[in-house]
Image (cartoon, helix red, strand yellow):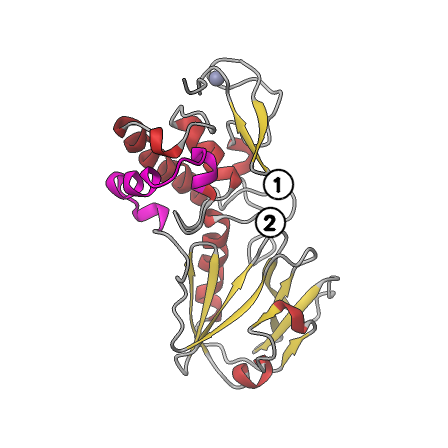
Amino acid sequence: MPELPEVQTIVATLHPKLSGQPIGRVRLMRQDILHPPGADLAALLRDRVFTEISRRGKKIILSLDDGRRFYIHLGMTGRLTLEPAAAPLLPHTHLILELPQGQELRFRDPRRFGGIWWLGNDQPADIGLGPEPLDLTAPQLAARLARTRRPVKSALLDQALLAGLGNIYADEALFAAKIHPLKPASKLSEAEIRLLTRQIKNVLNRALKHKGSTLRDYRNADGQPGGFQKLHRVYDRAGQPCHNCRAPVVRLVISGRSAHFCPKCQPKPR
Ligand SMILES: [Zn+2]
């Protein structure tokens, strides 16, 4: 699933290419990916000009010259790509926006956990979202973790607590901070929270430098994969030796989501 580094990479590629571009024909192949249902996307977008592409959490926010905005969430398998109109149309393409010079913006999502949300000019994009991890301070994280006894791994995935982390970067940040994923969030020490805050930013910044991680589906807006998957220390490495201590990395399921950690470097909470 695309997380902050992948979504930010897409936004960084799209913003310079889409800003100032007028939208031509709008083709929405599936109404059920559009929220609220029944919105007339073709009428809302026709003849509008893109002014800005930005990110909040894992949402890609597309702003228009009339002050209105909508966002795309990529869910598990979504891709938002800029392609020549002549490029073959892949199955599960749900939205096509025609752009000048024979280009198209295409949204494709085989599993359809993603979608398109119309915000108009009054609805904020950050409803239900916690702070951005790259601006996070340790006291902010401490206050948010203190409120929940869930395992810290589950808390980090909660977008209302912190916006933008998913399974990959939560696992990698906990490994770097040497914190067991099952440790109750409210039981983290001040020192652990300081280190975790620093490692969340560190892991995300390194992933941004490598343009995100591609395990299966993720591609940036030009169709290119990321490179950070080669640098994962624990994520998707179950059974392989820990880079620090050679103990095999363990995979665990916590509240229906997988967690990867080193049982020696991240000792079990007492
Ligand atoms: Zn280890």
Residue type, mark 2 in image = Tyr
Q: From the viewer's side, name the closer residue of 206 and 170.
A: 170
Residue 185 in the figure: left or right of residue 231:
left
Mark 2 packing: few (<14 Cα in 10 Å), some, or many (20+)? Answer: many
**Magenta highlight range:** 132-156
Q: Classify mark 2: helix, strand or loop.
A: loop
* Amino acid carrying mark 1 in the image: Leu
Residue 154 forms part of the magenta stretch = yes
Query: Which corner quadrant holds the C terminus?
Result: top left
Residue 253 is situated, as x and y percent measured from the top left of the image, at: 59, 32
The location of residue 267, given as percent across then percent down, is: 44, 17
Give the structural element (helix, strand or loop) at label 1.
loop
Q: Is mark 2 within 8 Å of ligand 1?
A: no
Residue under label 1, please give it: 215
Identify the residue at horizontal 36%, vertical 46% (top origin): 133
* Residue 266 in the image, given as x and y percentages of width and height: 44, 20
Identify which residue, 135 or 118, lies in the foreground: 118
Instruction: Tell me where residue 128 sits by quadrant.
Output: bottom left
Within 10 Å of the Cα at label 1, are there few (<14), some (14-19), or many (20+) other Cα atoms?
A: some
Q: Marks 1 and 2: in contact by CB < 8 Å?
A: yes
Which residue is under mark 2? 218
Q: Main secondary structure of the magenta part?
A: helix
